[in-house]
Amino acid sequence: MKLLVATTETQGQRKNDFCFVPEGEIVHSTLECDGEAIDGVCGCRRSMSGLKCYKGTTTMKCVDVEITEAELKGLIFDFYCKGWKMSLIDATKAGEVEGAELMRLAGYFAVGAIVEKRGSNLQVRTPK
């Protein structure tokens, strides 16, 4: 299935780029700071986080990932249960809702597209 994963491709195109997520790890959107500017020091409004490492990246790539929908939901469940200490019920619901959202978002991009997050928008990053 198509999903967004961390990549270092086009890193450095923006002076505030960063990638602390292992190449190819599935990413998702997480919490953002109140009042943080898109290019603020935190980076939460321009990055996505790895589902396994809990770290952020400003560059993502749309790829075909060999994973089932159930496995994806399981990764999200683990992220919230282990990392955020959510209840089993809440983590299960998060897996369902967020799994569908990650598949929907990736559907907007062609395989191979480099994607960046700018506030609430995901957009193709044009290599310079």
Image: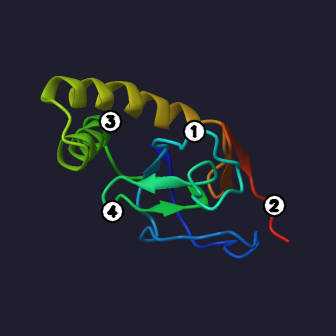
Amino acid beneath label 4: Cys
Q: Residue at x 40, y 31 (%)?
A: 98
Mark 4, mark 3: which one is toward the viewer? 4
Q: Who comes first in sequence, dot 4 or dot 3?
A: 4
**Residue lying furthest right in this view?**
128
Q: Amino acid at mark 3?
A: Glu
Residue that badge 4 annotates: 53
Q: Which mark is residue 69?
A: 3
Residue 8: quadrant of the picture? bottom right
Image coordinates for residue 101, horizontal then vertical, percent:
48, 30
Query: Which amino acid, mark 1?
Result: Asp
Q: Residue at x 45, y 54 (%)?
A: 49
- Which residue is labeled 1 in the image? 34
Quadrant showing the N terminus: top left
Number of callouts? 4
Callout 3: 10 Å neighbours few (<14), some, many (20+)?
A: some
At mark 3, the secondary structure is helix
Q: CA distance from mark 4 to mark 2?
A: 27 Å
Residue 86 position in % (x across, y down): 20, 34
Quickly name the residue at label 2: 126
Asked if residue 106 is positioned above or below residue 115 in the image, the reply reads above
Q: Residues within 10 Å of mark 4 (few under 14, many from 20)?
A: some
Residue sitting at 25 percent across and 44 percent down?
A: 84
